[in-house]
Image: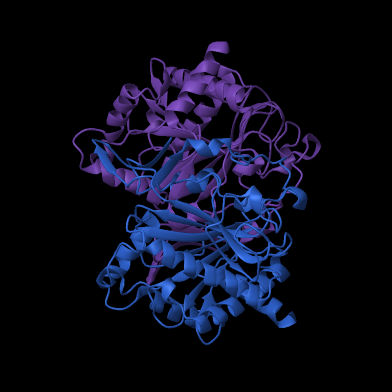
Chain colours: A blue, B purple
Amino acid sequence: MREIRKDPIHNRWVIIASNRKNRPHAFYREEEEVGSKKECPFCEGKEKKTPPEIDSFRASGKPNEPGWEIRVVPNKFPALTSDGEPRKVYNGLYYKINGFGIHEVIIETPYHKKNLFNMDKKEISLIISMYKKRYLALKENKNLKYILIFKNHGKIAGGSLPHSHSQIIGLPLIPPEIEEEIILVEDSVKCHYCKLIQRAYNENRVLKRNKDFIVLAPYASVAPYELVIYPLQHKPCFEEIKDSEITSLSELLQDVFKKYNKVLGNPPFNYFLHTAPTALTPRVYKNYHWHIVIMPKLTMTAGFEKSSNIYINPVEPKEAVGKLREAGEEL
Amino acid sequence: MREIRKDPIHNRWVIIASNRKNRPHAFYREEEEVGSKKECPFCEGKEKKTPPEIDSFRASGKPNEPGWEIRVVPNKFPALTSDGEPRKVYNGLYYKINGFGIHEVIIETPYHKKNLFNMDKKEISLIISMYKKRYLALKENKNLKYILIFKNHGKIAGGSLPHSHSQIIGLPLIPPEIEEEIILVEDSVKCHYCKLIQRAYNENRVLKRNKDFIVLAPYASVAPYELVIYPLQHKPCFEEIKDSEITSLSELLQDVFKKYNKVLGNPPFNYFLHTAPTALTPRVYKNYHWHIVIMPKLTMTAGFEKSSNIYINPVEPKEAVGKLREAGEEL
């Protein structure tokens, strides 16, 4: 049973996906053991343990055989599936869409122990290239209104398997978070994000920049040590990223994760990519500015946050940048 | 350093509370050991280990001595403090309030092993009575615009100490979650929540009712096995609850937690109380309907939820009610 339901009170949706309750890690239990290499379905040589691959970058071999560098497979327990067409149903107080969508997993490396903390620039750039490739492929599906790329690393950050991977969810709606961002920029004269970048400079919250990208700690960071990466030039759409920019972005990401490792010791984290919705026209999103938000998972959000949409962050963003900068000098 | 910062993009606030990073459990670590009874500061006889008590229900003894049934103390690492007055600062893109507020802890029992899963009706009703008492006391502080009562049980649900306790945070602003609810009801002719209750009956999502309260699974439950308790009669303000209603509510709560225990095995959980803001007039909130939301903590929200404000719930709400109902028959 799968449905995407609009909360009747809040600007929030829920995907009801009963099938997911049968997956091995559906319910978090503190005593759960993280899967060992032996049983890992994402390692090279275990290709038959995943659903057949959708895409890959490979130096050798045929699909579903060893020889790959990046591998994309359908999520074994998808939150959404692409059977049929999305249908919206309004029913008095309630509004819903059937569970239409795409849920893919990007296996970022054939090696069990590799992750963003120890990958080289080339390995990271392959991940970004695959994000772009899959984004462009899914963009062809006109039933998808938004394509969300994100990553959960570490059990406490929702990473149910330890082997490094990202996820892509294609949605038949524009998520509320993005909707809020688009509403804000739609009628503005100048890009709101460009202004935020300028303010981060003025307020010493910029961690680093290179020729194409900047990474900063947002003024109202929700998570301790939260960072956001923006292209320096105003650009609404991630998928227009050029190869040279993929290289710059990978450099910056590698540096960020080295700093995180140094200061926070391989912390669990989430990151996600926010870009202009595929469902909208450039007229609407021209002032949008794509970005990647990285949130180390160091605190638990609980009753207070859920009941208020107010977060408690124990680390001042400027101070977080200071600590990460110091670490950089020692790298 | 303490500030409450408005996110420049989203309708979301962050309390920057640097002092909290020094508390023992500020950063979640999976290997952390839950405090044993020996070192628990909330047990009877350990009164000196907490800041001096603000309030209590006690059969005997003086403040900060044994003999209490419920004890209220300031949070040792408060997210907010009541020094001075709240001041709003608008600064171009940014909006903030200084970290004004109240943060109290309600120690619900002198016994280390007691909790909502094994307390009797009388013990639970004392907790509710203390919620009311503290709410009324804090309502006198005209600098507080909202008083939030919530509970985190279990480490994974943000409960940093295992000894059963609730928290109260008094805020100098109306939280976005409540703001959304108030905006919805302000201009409505009839209470929106009363309609939701009716729909829950029609759709077989009611778990139970007694003479004063009803407990149901919401249509778009964010968490698996989420339940909401409403007073049957339309009532905006929790603090007007009568003693006989406290008894009814305690009966219902006891039953709900017995069912949770039976079906989910003493699950970690959060609950919170949503009531009309103290800062508003009855004209504005007359159509508000107070309620308690209970969310077992069984899944991890991660990159997807953070980036979208869309949640994935693996259990259909009606099915959750069915399972809990079956359990009830065996109790």
Q: How many marks?
A: 0
Answer with left or right where residue A275 lies relative to residue A76. Answer: left
Residue A183: x and y, percent? 30, 63
- Quadrant containing the N terminus of chain B is bottom right
Extreme residue toward the right, this view: B38
* In this view, B46 is above or below A123: above
Residue closest to the eye, A67 or A102: A67
Find the residue positioned furthest to the front: A62
Q: Classify residue B157 by image quadrant.
A: top right
Q: Could you tell me if residue B58 is visible in this image? A: yes
Q: Find the residue positioned furthest to the bottom.
A: A211
- Is B220 or B197 nearer to us in this picture? B220
Residue found at x 38% / y 60%: A178
Note whether A139 is above or below B218 in the view shown.
below
Q: Position of residue B181 (x, y in %)?
A: 33, 43
Q: Is residue B116 above or below residue A211?
A: above
Residue A124's quadrant in the figure?
bottom right
Q: Quadrant of the C terminus of chain B?
A: top right
Q: Position of residue A264 (x, y in %)?
A: 70, 65
| Residue A123 place in picture, x, y as percent | 64, 73
On the question of residue B250 being in view, the answer is no
